Amino acid sequence: MSTHIANRTRVLTLIGTIITQFALGSVYTWSLFNAQLADKLSEPVSRVAFSFGILSLALAVASSMAGKMQERFSVRKVTIGAGILLGASLLLTAHATNLILLYVFAGFLIGFADGTGYLMTLSNCVKWFPERKGLISACAIGAYGLGSLGFKFINMYLLEHNGLESTFDVWGVIAMVMVIIGGLMMKDAPKQEISAVEAAEGVRDYSLAESMKCPQFWMLALVFLTVCMSGLYVIGVAKDIGQSYVHLSVEVAASAVAIIAVANLGGRLVLGVLSDKMARTNVIAIALAVCLLGVCALLFAHLNMMVFYFAVACIAFSFGGTITVFPSLVSDFFGLNNLTKNYGVIYLGFGIGSFIGSIVASVFGGFIATFYLMFALLVVSLVIALTIKLPNGESDAQLVANN
């Protein structure tokens, strides 16, 4: 493939990935629908909201399987299939008549469609730009985050003017068309060849089975689970923390949602770009330190509105930055060619982490137990980030210096 054609192909793949990620990010508007779905099904909001927990878990599981599907069918075909399934699932959700159907359509199917497209298209795009992995991750994952913001306004408008079922129908069609268009623009990234310099330094591609035999794989998995548990738990209940724990008014507590959105996006952009300039383990250490600062504020500071905003901003910044940098970090440790599979298994921590925080809070009766668990795991993860070596015994900083 000539350089001109290769550049055109990878730019088109990047644009297609951004369009796809924007549409896939729309699932994070789910909280807009809980109250109306609860009224329609005559069920408590808490039971209806559980569908999003199923969605998060299905998303993580599908992400871990997407690499195999891409190998068999190509990124284009799998992305188009994910788009069709996402649209169909949203149309089916519009007509769910009981909780079980809601859990199947809105939880399992939407989550599976979203996860299939999310990690595979992100990893494929990163492989096209090995020299700009952090920046490309920031563009793709930033689009995913902006999708939740953009579709928030679209879905709020539709809910206000068209009603619940029509909103799901229109949302389904828009998201499906965007993912299909994005998929048509993508091509599978070429297999990355390891240079003579990298080979001499011991850099190589690890299969999933080989990666899972390395202690570094499980260390990175623990770090990822820690940040996801902290971020997803606090983002999910920020308003409730503000009201019940900090004793703020509903309006002041609800403003945390906007602060989280800005900090989350800021983390993706700042740490994503920074990860192309310095060792990615150091970038993750910065993210963990910022998150630890936020958790310490919630646990040990005298709480008021500004301290609460500062704490949730720190945690959201860290979460956004970590999920942006992690695909590139995993490729540094285990190679680019099997990134979708290797990161796919680590990404299960996203779904598991979202459950652990809520389970600990419900078993031990409140936020404080989860905050202490977050504190302990963040300390352990920070030590890992500062001391972890590549599987060949080199440090991440040495890899950056050599390149």
Image (cartoon, rainbow, N blue to C red):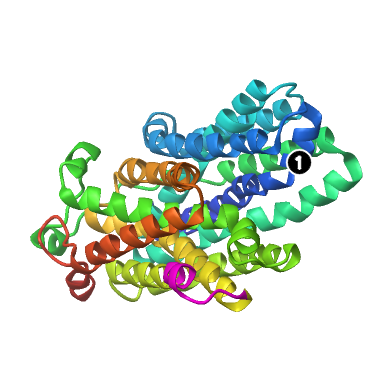
Above or below, 240 relative to 184: below
The residue lying at 55 percent from left, 61 percent from top is 142
In the image, is 259 to the left or to the right of 128? Answer: right
Above or below, 68 relative to 348: above
The residue lying at 57 percent from left, 50 percent from top is 21
* Spot occupied by residue 168 in the image (x, y as percentages of width and height): 76, 36
Q: Which residue, as the protein is rendered here, is positioned at the far front? A: 365
Numbered-mark total? 1
Question: Is there any visible trace of residue 167 in the rendered image?
Answer: yes
Magenta span main SS: helix
Question: Toward the viewer: 351 or 66?
Answer: 351
Q: Report the span colored magenta.
A: 294-304
Above or below, 5 relative to 303: above
Question: Is there any visible trace of residue 144 in the rendered image?
Answer: no
Q: Which residue, as the protein is rendered here, is positioned at the far right? A: 161
* Spot occupied by residue 178 in the image (x, y as percentages of width and height): 66, 44
* Spot occupied by residue 325 in the image (x, y as percentages of width and height): 39, 62
In the image, is 354 to the left or to the right of 224? Answer: right
